[in-house]
Amino acid sequence: MSLGLAGIVPLIHVTTAIAATKLGTLVLGGLISYLGWKAYQRTGAPPLRALSVGFGIVTVGAAVGGVVDQFLLQSQSTLYGILVSSALTLVGFGVITYSLYME
């Protein structure tokens, strides 16, 4: 009989791992957005601006989804966190796609 991952890793470690990966996503996504914005300022190319904004939206979505999941005091907070994160990821990827088709 298998206990699965939940039987091996205590829940507190999973919560810590989620927080750590969200922090890493925030740092790296913020860096990508910053570098994209600096490239836009240097070149003046509107597609780079849109690309930077798109990555910023995806990054904010991951962070806000994590905050909603951790701090919303409802039994459905995980579902709301996933919904917020997914919605902002969708919008961000839409902006990134748009940036790749801009002239």
Image (cartoon, rainbow, N blue to C red):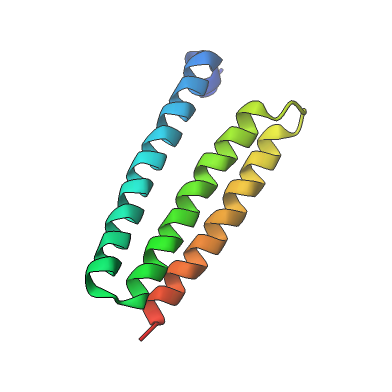
Name the residue located 49 percent from the left edge and 56 percent from the top edge.
57
Image x and y of residue 85, in percent: 58, 47
Name the residue located 59 percent from the left edge and 52 percent from the top edge.
86
Report the label total: 0
Name the residue located 64 percent from the left edge and 35 percent from the top edge.
68
Q: Which quarter of the rendered picture does the N terminus lie within?
A: top right
Q: Taking 70 as reference, is 26 left or right? A: left
Q: Nearer the viewer, residue 99 or 10?
A: 99
Image x and y of residue 31, in percent: 31, 48
Residue at the extreme left: 42
Q: Is residue 73 above or below residue 45?
A: above
| Quarter assignment of residue 47 | bottom left
Image x and y of residue 74, in percent: 77, 28
Q: Taking 29 as reference, is 92 left or right? A: right
Is residue 55 visible in the rendered image? The answer is: yes
Q: Is residue 39 above or below residue 98?
A: above
Q: Nearer the viewer, residue 74 or 44?
A: 44
Name the residue located 66 percent from the left edge and 48 percent from the top edge.
83
Image x and y of residue 23, in percent: 41, 33
Q: Nearer the viewer, residue 13 or 81?
A: 81
Q: Which quarter of the rendered picture does the C terminus lie within?
A: bottom left
Is residue 2 visible in the rendered image? The answer is: no
Q: Is residue 5 above or below residue 59?
A: above
| Quarter assignment of residue 99 | bottom left
